[in-house]
Image: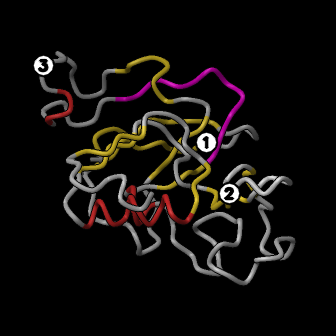
């Protein structure tokens, strides 16, 4: 329903919501543009564009379709191609909505979140200080701010060191 967020004040995405239809993305974009506050509390959100196709019996929206390749998808040249939102054709990088993008993953249990500016309102009343670490807050997948020119202005409230599945070091960001 493209109007599911009408008259709402807040949209919360609270857990690894990686697969979105174009309709879902359009509805959340429209809600944001209408002044709805957005809160994303996990990583790798709005990453894959999927379609909801009918079942073999013709019941609508019963099969989640995701080819993960425009060349393999029969609809690969259309806006419903089941590829990463950030890729062509019809690129809509997730940071244009969220302010940061999925970066990588690991097999580790998670990493500590490193508190940035402890005076930031998100830390209000917690008693944390800059540099404090909060164990197991950064999960096995993470996002970071990327300079691709599509991200809105964000404040970085935490930057944590992470290690990918291949052992390369990187960063995870918490943005506001």
Q: Nearer the viewer, mark 2 or mark 3?
A: 2
Nearest the eye: 85 or 66 = 66
Tags 2 and 1 in contact by the CB under 8 Å rule? no
Quadrant position of the N terminus in the picture? bottom left
Image position of 27 with respect to 160: above or below: below
The residue at the point 30 percent across, 60 percent down is 31
Nearest the eye: 21 or 113 = 21
Which quadrant of the view contains residue 53? bottom right
Q: Is residue 110 magenta?
A: yes
The residue at the point 14 percent across, 35 percent down is 121
CA gap, disc 2 and disc 3: 43 Å
Nearest the eye: 171 or 78 = 78
Nearest the eye: 1 or 107 = 1
- Describe residue 115's horizontal placement relative to residue 49 as left or right: left
N-term mark: 1 or 3: 3
Which quadrant of the view contains residue 173? top left
Image position of 124 with respect to 104: above or below: above
- Describe residue 51's horizontal placement relative to residue 68 as left or right: left
Which residues, given as a range, are shown in magenta? 104-114
Tags 2 and 3 in contact by the CB under 8 Å rule? no
The residue at which mark 2 appears reads as 52
The residue at which mark 3 appears reads as 125
CA gap, disc 2 and disc 1: 37 Å
SS for callout 3: loop
Where residue 128 sits: x, y (%)?
22, 19
N-term mark: 2 or 1: 2
């Amino acid at each position: 329903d493209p109007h599911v967020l009408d008259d709402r004040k807040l949209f919360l995405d609270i857990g690894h919501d990686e697969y979105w239809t174009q309709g879902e993305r359009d509805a959340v974009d429209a809600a944001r543009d209408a002044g709805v506050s957005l809160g994303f509390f996990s990583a790798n959100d709005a990453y894959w564009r999927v379609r909801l196709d009918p079942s073999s019996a013709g019941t609508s929206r019963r099969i989640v379709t995701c080819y993960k390749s425009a060349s393999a998808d029969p609809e690969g040249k259309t806006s419903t191609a089941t590829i990463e939102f950030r890729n062509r054709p019809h690129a809509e990088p997730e940071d244009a909505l969220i302010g940061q993008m999925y970066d990588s993953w690991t097999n580790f249990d998670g990493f500590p979140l490193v508190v940035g500016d402890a005076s930031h309102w998100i830390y209000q009343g917690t008693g944390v200080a800059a540099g404090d670490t909060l164990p197991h807050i950064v999960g096995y997948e993470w996002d970071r701010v990327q300079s691709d020119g599509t991200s809105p202005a964000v404040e970085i409230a935490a930057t944590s060191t992470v290690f990918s599945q291949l052992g390369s070091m990187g960063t995870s960001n918490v943005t506001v």
